[in-house]
Image: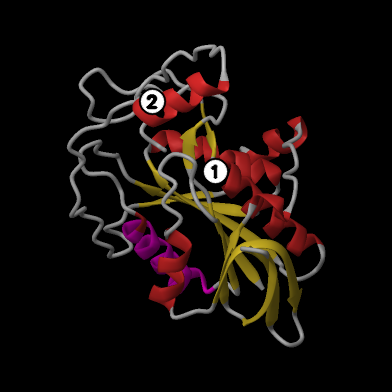
């Protein structure tokens, strides 16, 4: 069985995000970029399934500019067999929407015929949490979202997914092929070792365009303005409970 894993290049989680002076988008110039943390978990899970004998090959895929190849090299250094780079230069005013990404992944899935597609449940830049669900709908495949445990039965061609829900956990059984999105508690991603980083340079990254896949990615949404959250006001020390109640009632107006 082949596993297709989607990865995304985002501003590193440890970097303080800043907005461009013209307020058209987040400033990514000279900013450290890395693989989306949820995507790292997806790659790790695919590799563990391959190591357990549930899969024979792990194929990584990303959509983005030429610089996004670094994200694919990270996936290859972690252990993915090969990769697809769908080239797309982003337009801040017309961002690539989850539906467009889902259409691209669908085209790759029809081309590669994987038995399982694993994605991070969301990206930390837009927090959309939509691509996996849309991809499953486009392919008409079953889906297991927010997975905290995945077990594959090769003989029965089924995937058992344990997922977190409000108030507990839910276990579902999916017929393969299927789409799974990963939660934070699914695993702890491995680090890419220096020898594997060197080996990744010789692995295949196939470059294609949305047009090559016959996918229309034109956006019907325009970003009008991007603003930073308002700065938090400084706190004050109150002398009594009565003063606190007075401020809550007359200033905050929450009582």
Relative side of 28 to 72, left or right: left
Report x, y in % for residue 163: 66, 66
Tell me whether circle 2 and circle 1 mark residues in contact (CB < 8 Å): no
- Asked whether residue 202 is drawn in magenta, I would say no
Hey, which quadrant is residue 104 in on the image?
bottom left
Mark yes or no: residue 55 visible: yes
Image quadrant occupied by the N terminus:
bottom right
Residue visible at 21% across and 33% down?
225
Mark 1 residue crowding within 10 angstroms, few (<14) / some (14–19) / many (20+): many
Q: How is the image coloured?
A: secondary structure
Residue visible at 31% across and 59% down?
212
Image quadrant occupied by the C terminus:
top left
- Determine which of the numbered discs, if any, sits on residue 28 in the image: 2
Camera-side residue of 218 and 81: 218
Circle 1 is placed at which residue position?
72
Camera-side residue of 31 and 194: 31
Residue located farthest toward the front when viewing the structure as drawn: 242
Camera-side residue of 172 and 158: 172
Report x, y in % for residue 107: 39, 67
**Residue span colored magenta:** 99-113
- Asked whether residue 105 is drawn in magenta, I would say yes
Mark yes or no: residue 80 visible: no
Report x, y in % for residue 195: 76, 34
Query: Compared to 219, does 171 lie above or below?
Result: below
State which tag comes first along the sequence, 2 or 1.
2
**Mark pair 2, 1: CA separation:** 19 Å
- Determine which of the numbered discs, if any, sits on residue 118 in the image: none
């Amino acid at each position: 069985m082949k596993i297709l894993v989607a990865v995304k290049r985002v501003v590193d989680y440890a970097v303080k995000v800043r907005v461009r002076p013209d307020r058209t988008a987040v400033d990514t110039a000279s900013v450290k970029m890395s693989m989306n943390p949820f995507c790292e978990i997806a790659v790790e899970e695919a590799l563990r399934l391959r190591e357990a004998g549930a899969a024979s090959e792990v194929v990584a895929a990303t959509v983005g500019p030429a610089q996004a190849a670094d994200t694919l090299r990270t996936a290859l250094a972690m252990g993915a067999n090969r990769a697809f780079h769908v080239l797309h230069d982003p337009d801040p005013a017309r961002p690539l929407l989850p539906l467009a990404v889902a259409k691209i992944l669908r085209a790759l899935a029809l081309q590669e015929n994987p038995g399982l597609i694993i994605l991070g449940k969301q990206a930390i830049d837009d927090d959309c949490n939509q691509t996996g669900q849309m991809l499953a709908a486009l392919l008409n495949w079953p889906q297991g979202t927010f997975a905290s445990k995945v077990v594959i039965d090769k003989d029965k061609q089924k995937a058992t997914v344990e997922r977190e829900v409000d108030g507990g956990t839910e276990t579902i059984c999916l017929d393969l092929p299927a789409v799974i999105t990963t939660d934070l508690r699914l695993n702890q991603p491995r680090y890419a070792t220096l020898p594997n980083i060197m080996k990744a340079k010789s692995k295949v990254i196939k470059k294609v365009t949305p047009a090559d896949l016959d996918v229309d990615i034109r956006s019907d949404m325009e970003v009008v303005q991007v603003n930073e959250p308002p700065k938090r006001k400084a706190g004050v020390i109150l002398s009594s409970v009565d003063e606190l109640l007075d401020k809550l009632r007359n200033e905050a107006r929450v009582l």
